[in-house]
Amino acid sequence: MRREVLIAWPIALLLVVSGLMLGCNGEGDAADEAGMTTTYGAISSKVRGMDPMDIGDTTSSGIASNIYDCLYQYHYLKRPYELIPNLAAEMPTVSEDGLTYTIKLRDDVYFQDDPCFTETDGKGRKLVADDFIYSWKRIADIKNISKNWWIFDGKIKGFDEFREYTKTAESKADVDYSRPVAGLEAVDDTTLRITLVKPWPQVVYYLAHLPSAAVPREAVEHYGDEFLNHPVGTGPYQLKTWRHGSKIVMERNPTFREVLYPSEGDPDDEAAGRLADAGKRLPLIDRIDITIIEESQPLWLKLMAGDLDIGGIPKDNFDTAISPTRDLTPELVEQGVVLEVYEDAATYWYGFNMEDPLLGNNKPLRQAMNLAIDRADFLKKFMNNRGVEARGVLPPMIAGYDEDIDSPYTVYDTELAKQKVKEAEAEYGGPLPMITLTMGGTDSTQRQTGQWFIRSYENVGLKVEVEYMDWPSMQEKVKTKSAQMYSMGWVADIPDAENFMQLFYGPNGSPGANNMNYKNPEVDALYEKIAVMDESPERVALVREMQQKVVDDLPCVLTIHRVVFILHYDWLNNYKPHVFQYGLAKYRNLDAELRQQRVGR
């Protein structure tokens, strides 16, 4: 699941959804059942779909990661981030040569009850090792046009051959999923064996990443093309209602296996009250009701009214919430609001489709378009200085980040930009045509951002128009290489530089993660080296060399690395900032008495 995200303040809300912006009141689809703990919340963007095979954005994965789960997960409380078993019974056994991973599964995991299980009258069946093999074959199947093939490409013995075989099938229905793959073996129902063609040190990280989640074949075949709207997983919540564009309701999965809240964490977790629920069975909340509200001000008003437990701060309300010393204002403190600030593992940019004849073949134009952007002004106007200017691809918290990177064109210099525009015109052979920037959002902030870009480029003699569309539509346009230039970014899937650098690996072009469709043989060769290396000073040096070559080629307009400001009420228990904010709703809890005292509900 690549972490594509929008560029603008709503990013905060998109990331919080995985912690689920839990609220205390609202109108659900039906009256709460007796004793059921119901929370209400909101997200700022439509959900594209809930099929792990094709999820590649923070919004969809924020919801779906509470319905599906993976072999491994990150410990909720410990930092640095630590992988622990989830659907796996233990961490994998690895062969001496590092090429074979044997994974034992838990024997108490069942898919959620669903009508697709016709042989058991709708009762979910037990998860088996073959479910993972089937699910990953769906990603490999060329007929599915999965954007997540980059995860497995060239890594598992016989898997690329299976992908090539799917090209020969007449249709989706003709693909034989029983066809063996040498490197994927279900030794028995609870033992999965993966054999690699070369070292892949990051493999366990990716087995904690949503696209690797198991889906039941019965559901895929029962729902067909509508499977993305009918998720059937093994997670703590199951989908009850989904009105596209307006509401999503999830309820506790009654057959969810026994998973307990952690009993240990970092030294400050006990004092912060994050261990009060230690040993309790998860999830702690029964029902989550989420409304989709694309405009920032209605969301903010609901948060300030106490109708949401947690939320981001819109740019236009930042000064009313945060003091000049970057602390929470006394008024909000008195209301029981708590401020959380953390550095995000993310980089944001405006990508060029490098297969576009104009942008891809005219380096002076790409240089000019970078030089024309005042990143400091962007941070001030649209992010309230919540972040730092991006000079390179890697964010500061990822090994390989280089604060001294040689990046002469990711600075603001209108005079040099005008000079580069002239060079670009000479290379093009005349005046440059209109360039179209596609933005995934229709709210007022997105439109203000679009107008800012138009003015920035007009200042150096470039003509740019902006088209606005909803987030799912823009993703589809980028996936099909139909966008010329587009607003996007990347939040780390795993805590490793490889996850960012694969965005610039040629074979990962759309519909894969390299949606800029950037190709450079030298960059590809460096990526292939770092992808098989364990972390070391030598690897960091190669990562920086690769990053430098990407920055020299400028396949995008780099903008910022974000710092997240999150507000939550003190009745929301167990909140802890987490860079990998997916599948975390099961840990949240509410102090209903304190909520009643503060807001009377």
Image (cartoon, grey):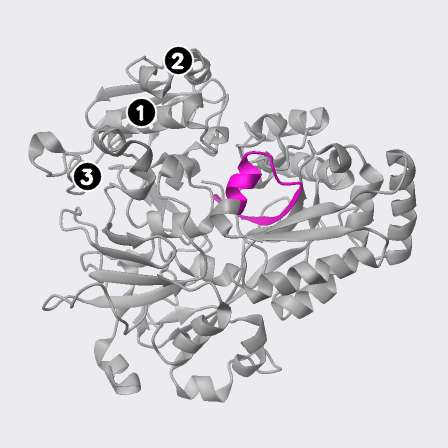
- The picture places residue 561, in percent across and down from the top left corner, at 62, 56
Q: Which mark is residue 111?
A: 3
Count every numbered label the image shows and give the total: 3
Mark pair 3, 2: CA separation: 31 Å
Q: Quadrant of residue 85?
A: top left
Whichever of labels 1 and 2 marks the residue nearer the N terminus, that label is 1
User: Which of the pair 471/554 is nearer the observer?
Assistant: 471
Q: Is residue 208 visible?
A: no
Which residue is found at the position 55% from the left and 77% from the top?
317
Q: Which residue is mark 2?
A: 170
Where does the magenta region start and end? 474-497
SS for tag 2? loop
Residue 285 percent coordinates (x, y): 22, 62
Q: Residue furthest left?
A: 121
Looking at the image, tell me whether mark 3 or mark 2 is earlier in sequence order: 3
Residue 279 to residue 137: above or below: below
Give the image quarter of residue 183.
top left
| Residue type (three-letter) at the residue carrying disc 1 | Ile
Under tag 3, what secondary structure? loop
